[in-house]
Image (spheres, rainbow, N blue to C red):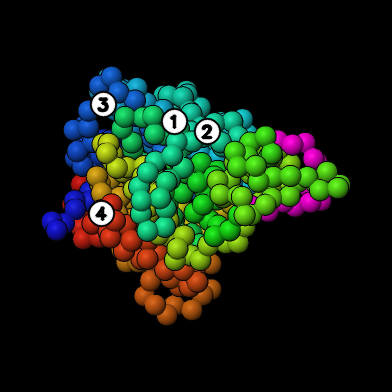
Amino acid sequence: MEKSKVYFADFRATSECNLLQKLEKLVKKAGIETLPFADRYTAVKIHFGEPGNLSYLRPNFSKVIVDLVRRQGGKVFLTDCNTLYVGRRKNALDHLDAAYENGYNPFATGCHILIADGLKGTDDTLVPIDCEYVKEAKIGRAIMDADIFISLTHFKGHESTGIGGALKNIGMGCGSRAGKMEMHSDGKPVVEKDECRGCGACRKNCAHDAISFDENHRAQIDHEKCVGCGRCIGACNFDAVHPGGDTANEILNCKIAEYAYAVLKDRPHFHISLVMDVSPNCDCHAENDAPIVPDVGMFASFDPVALDVACADAVNRQPVLNGSFLAEQPQTTHDHFTDTHPVTDWRVGIDHAVKIGLGNRDYELITIK
């Protein structure tokens, strides 16, 4: 297979070319303008950051992409799906508030935000893929309604997947709450009886008659009838319904790759990753730890797999920053992400993505000055 092209620009700036102008130059060189934007809907998938976390991408970067799409006659929106866990982004209203709090408003970005899986995370589209772990991916409807897909990713570490790159942003990020449960969980949902109010919302949203109520009017789930769709989790306003047992990290990485395949197949797509503020953990935390390496630069490619590998390789060429979490860990593997989170291997997801035809691990790095 021919090597995929990954374009790179460092973070050096001059009075003639600031970082936003450099990002625009990078994506143009990488070929973003060859996409058929005119009169079509473009989804720009981004993580708006959990309030309290300051390592998310500045909204100014997204405006570069938004303005470029609009100049080409496209209709563009920023998007993400609701989270599965308790936090500030588990429903569309709180999610929008969190995005605005972090500066993602139309004045800063040049477009509107659509939370792709709706108010409670139950508005999704079933995408048949018939892969090894996932047969039907549950993707936020607004994302699947878009004609063109662009990912804009803050590349960092991740405690479960090893790296938080383009595949994680696309695969996990575009899953509805039910989709996220499918990726994270091997089991069926369970009810925390002490939190249940007996409101009946979960039963109303169950299409399989799997939910009943005990003598104390607390919900209970019949796992023989339950298909694990996760809609009861989204329906509960009291966080009383939780996913079942956790998926092993290796399988989680494979499921994320399959979900990313579901998002990207059969339509034009393009991917950008910024390797800066490389925190050891996900931006879903309400805090961010010190960066583990210096800022590296900006990367762009039509191939999200090659993009992730190029970003990881670039991070692994950097020195470890003193005072970081990684500096406190044994340096045994010559891989910063494995040394940071030895319980997971990020390459498993890459290998599986290659196996299902999502992209290529071999790349040609083209530097833009």
Q: CA distance from mark 4 to mark 1?
A: 24 Å
| Foreground pick, 314 / 322 | 314
Q: CA distance from mark 1 to mark 3?
A: 17 Å
Q: N-terminal of the two: label 1 or label 3? A: 3
Which residue has dot 3 on it?
37
Q: Which residues are magenta?
A: 189-201
Viewer can see residue 86: no
Is there CB contact under 8 Å for labels 1 and 2?
A: yes
Which residue has dot 2 on it?
123
| Foreground pick, 124 / 149 | 124
Q: Residues within 10 Å of mark 2 (few under 14, many from 20)?
A: many
Q: CA distance from mark 3 to mark 4?
A: 25 Å
**Amino acid on which disc 3 is placed:** Phe
* Helix, strand or loop at mark 2: loop
| Side (left or right) of 276 relative to 324 | left
Q: CA distance from mark 1 to mark 2?
A: 9 Å
Q: CA distance from mark 4 to mark 2?
A: 28 Å
Judged by its main secondary structure, the magenta piece is: loop
